[in-house]
Image (cartoon, grey):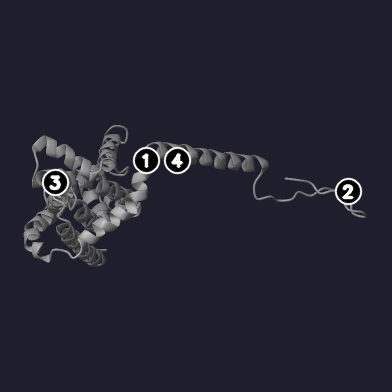
Amino acid sequence: MSKLAPRVGEPTHYSRIWTFRTPRARLALWFGWLALVALFVWCWQLMNEGTMWMFVADAPRQAADIGSRLFPPKLGYLPELLAPLWDTLNIATLGTLGGVIMAVPVAFLAARNTTPSATLIRPVALLVIVTSRSINSLIWALLLVAIIGPGLLAGIVAIALRSIGFVGKLLYEAIEETDARQIEAVAATGARSSQVIHYGIVPQVLPAFWGISVFRWDINIRESTILGLVGAGGIGMKLQSSIDTLAWSQVATILLVILATVVVSEAISARMRRALI
């Protein structure tokens, strides 16, 4: 804020001029930008130390070389991809189903208006959700392949464990946003806690539940295509073996199949969400 000097012939009073930021706010903003620039310079130095720029300079030529080997795709390889593609769809579908089944009770335990204990059980449920969301499905698959061996089971369990956090978080938020008046109306009839949940909460969150589940299935279709890179089954195993043998025309065919699968799953999930919500 600053003051104006009085003009000639005007009363000697002072008025304040509005400014967008106070001097303290401008100083804090300046220091914030300075810290951001310093952080950028530090990160650039770290990246520069760990980067071999001679390879970066050669990257366009290498990319053009690999791109020329990708085309034309080997369409005769398609019959060998049908079984792995079916495995990928099964991994995504069964993994989503398992994740949703485990996420529903976790969501009800995490929601403030349905948890039995806000001081003990709710933090445990939130910890389960955060743990599931913080570990990528590829890392889950890597751990499970080491524990239970390679194959479809490791991929299904990895997708399920990853889906718990996604479905649980969105579902418990939907539970907390339910209309309390409907719940109070059911409770006023003398209903038990289980009946209040069944008649007062479940009908309100059911559309959101179906939308979340279908959306997660769509995401899992994408994620399950790469789990084979670590031995968790599906079309990713074919992709890894083709890359290892430098069969780039087969790689192009696999990528086209994955792209078509993702496009179809996106269209199906969009139609299902419109029909359910």
Amino acid found under the numbered disc labelled 3: Gly
Kindly identify which numbered label has been placed on residue 12: 2
The residue where tag 3 is placed is 155
Residue located 24% across and 61% down the image: 68
- Could you tell which of marks 3 and 2 lies nearer the N-terminus? 2
Q: Earlier in the sequence, mark 2 or mark 4?
A: 2
Of label 3 and label 4, which has the lower sequence position?
4
* Amino acid type for the residue under numbered disc 2: Thr
Q: What element carries label 1?
A: loop
Residue at 22% from the left image edge and 40% from the top image edge:
139
In the image, 145: left or right of 41? left
Q: Which residue is rendered at x = 13% and y = 39% of the image?
A: 145
Q: Mark 2 and 4 residues: CB-CB less than 8 Å, in contact?
A: no
Give the mark toward the camera: 3 or 2.
3
- The x, y position of residue 53, in whole percent, is 38, 44
How far across and how far down the image is residue 171, in percent?
27, 50
Which label is found at residue 100? Answer: none
CA–CA distance in space, label 4 to label 1: 10 Å
> Which marked residue is nearer to the observer: mark 3 or mark 4?
4
